[in-house]
Structure formats: structure tokens, C-alpha cells
Image (cartoon, rainbow, N blue to C red):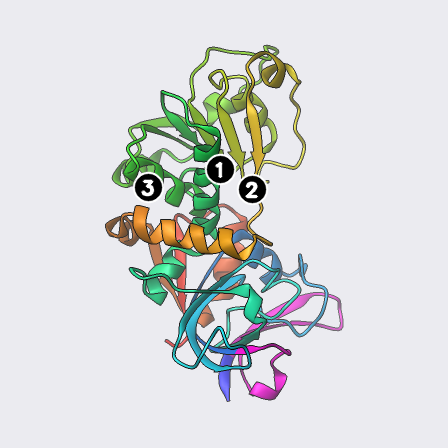
Amino acid sequence: MFNALVVEKNDDGKTSASVQQIGEDRLPEGDVTVAVEYSTVNYKDGLCIGPGGGLVRNYPHVPGIDFAGTVETSDDPRYKAGDKVVLTGWRVGEAYWGGYSQKARVKADWLVPLPDGLDTKQAMAVGTAGFTAMLAVMALEDHGIKDGPVLVTGAAGGVGSVATAILASLGHEVAGVTGRPETADYLKSLGATQIVAREELNETTKRPLEAETWGGCVDAVGGEMLARVLGQMKYGASVAAVGLAGGAGLPATVIPFLLRGVNLLGIDSVMQPYDNRLRAWERIAKDLPMDKLDAMVQPAVLSDLPALGRDILKGQVRGRVVVDVNA
């Protein structure tokens, strides 16, 4: 028997989450059984835990869209007992049981060997948010980051925090956008050299183009803020868009794309090819300064998750929440 956070649908159609003891016979089918050590709390986890059920279609359900741990058993020759592994994406924790459990069973194709230089706790301090941030940075590099500050929207959140730290470690000047003035010192500790108030980018304007300001952008917000940022990019610069917190709509014109050659790069961390996932994790181990992780991390245990799920939906969670599933 082992502990897991189980979300169940009640007779009234609402859901409830509680820590329960379950057996391996309840785990889904898969090639590899992992003794989970750490998971994280992301926005999707909040949706899955919340009373409306969010992204979950089948109950009972174990949320947790990522995890890191040690292989216990494997039917796949690529993994053997004792191997350290990390998993992000593939709708784990949404359509498939996830990381808020002391054991998980998954398809081998979904796993990546933990690269040298990272332990399981550090891997989840990075987590899906940090993995997504690295994918965004890699996409900007592939298209060429221009001279000038690189803008990071939603900079105090999970994706934004790691993107800020990575970009700063690579020698870029980073401008962090936040709606909470009290996070300015935190962002500066991660390497941001400029703090931009969210209100500045939420102001409406009829001008499709403004002064060329940003040499690149990791956008974790979307919506109207993304539309405003597009008009401020330098010629040929790129925006790597990773989030929809500001909405799925894009009230923009084609002018930034036609007259400034701006590139809008969509980043999807869910179904990345194996080689790209491995490259991203190896880059994280190499380029993310590990001393910055401590400033980003809030510790949690399984029993904390129902409240944390509500908090992250309200935008009240800063940085990364690392869940010790065995504590």
C-alpha cells in the first residue's frame, strides 16, 4: 500500500480530493513502475484538483502533471531498476494518473533519464514549468535573439521564474513583467535587470507598432498583453508564447509580422519528441544556475495540495512548489 492524492467525483457532480492509501492493483497499465520522489504544482494541477474537475474526464483520478523518481520495475530494456527518471507532458495528471502518488506506472516512451548534474528534487524544482521555459529559450535561440533586453511576462510565476534565471545565466539582459511590486527583489535575485509593471503592458493602445524595445520575449500570459508586446518587438525578433493565463484570444493585427518580421513561436511541452525532451533537460542541467533554484522553491506535502490547487488558480503562488510525496 502507498499514499496518493485521489480526486473523486461526488453524487452532486462536484469533486473532492483527499490523501488515500491504495494498492498497486489500482495503478494504470504501463511499461515502467516508478517510485515517485517529487512532483510539483502547476496551473493545470489546480484545475484538476478544483471543485469543477477542470481537465479530468475519468474518476477516480490522481493529479500531478510531472514527477521524478526511481525505476522499480521495467518491461522496457531502456530502463532498469534503480534508474533515475523524470516525466513531463503526455497528459499525465490529466487524462492519465500522475505524480501525486508514491508510485506511478507509465509508458516508457514518456520518460527521460535524469541527466547528470540534477537530482530528483532539483528536477522538480525545475519541473514542467522550467522544462517549458527551456523549450522557449531554445526556440528563441534557434530564431536568433536580437540585441536589447529580453522580456519575460508573468515573470514571478513558474515558467517566468526559470526563464528569467536561464536567460540571465546565458548573459542576456532580462526585463521581468509582474503585477506584484513585492516580487521585484525576487526577480532581481534571479537575474532580472529591469522590472516592468504589468499595468504598463495592459494599457490599451490603437497603435499596432510602438518603439522597438525587446530583443526577444518569453510570454507566459497571452491575451491582450501578448498583442501589446508584439508591437514592441525589434525587427526580426521572436516571441515564444507558452501560456494562456491572459486568455486564448489575440486582439492583434498582422502589422508586426509584416512590417517588423516578428516571429510568434508556439511552445507546447505536452508531446515533445524524445530527442528534444532529452536536449532540453541536458540544457537545464548545464545552463540553469542551481543556486537560483532555492529562491524559487516552496516545499509542500500531499496533504497541502487541495489548498495549493486553489491558490495557484488565484495567482497566489510564486515560483515553484515542490511536493515531497513521501513526507
Residue found at x 72% / y 64%: 57
The residue carrying pointer 3 sits among few (fewer than 14), some (14 to 19) or many (20 or more) residues within 10 Å by Cα, namely many
Provide the residue span drawn in magenta. Answer: 4-32
Count residues near mark 1 (Cα–Cα under 10 Å), then give few for <14, some for 14-19, many for 20+.
some
Label 2 – label 1 distance at C-alpha: 8 Å
Q: Is residue 276 left or right of residue 296?
A: right
The numbered disc on residue 139 is 1
* Quarter of the image where the C terminus is located: bottom left
Kindly identify which residue carries mark 3.
Answer: 165
Residue 217 placed where, x, y %? Answer: 46, 30
Q: Is residue 126 among the parts visible in the rendering?
A: yes
Q: CA distance from mark 2 to mark 3?
A: 18 Å
Task: Give the secondary structure at mark 3.
Answer: helix
Depicted 135 relative to depicted 51: above or below: above
Horizontal arrangement in the rendering, residue 182 relative to residue 128 (left or right): left
User: Is residue 153 something that shows in the picture?
Assistant: no
Three-letter code, disc 1: Ala
Residue at the disc numbered 2: 267
Labels 2 & 1 near each other (Cβ < 8 A)? yes
Based on the picture, tell me whether residue 122 belongs to the magenta stretch: no
* Vertical arrangement, residue 155 with respect to residue 44, above or below: above
- In 3D space, how far apart are the residues under numbered discs 1 and 3 (Cα atoms)? 16 Å
Q: Quadrant of residue 11?
A: bottom right
Name, please, the residue furthest toward the front: 77
Residue 306 image position (x, y, % from top left): 52, 64
- Is 291 placed left or right of 239 in the picture? left
Q: Nearer the viewer, residue 168 or 250?
A: 168
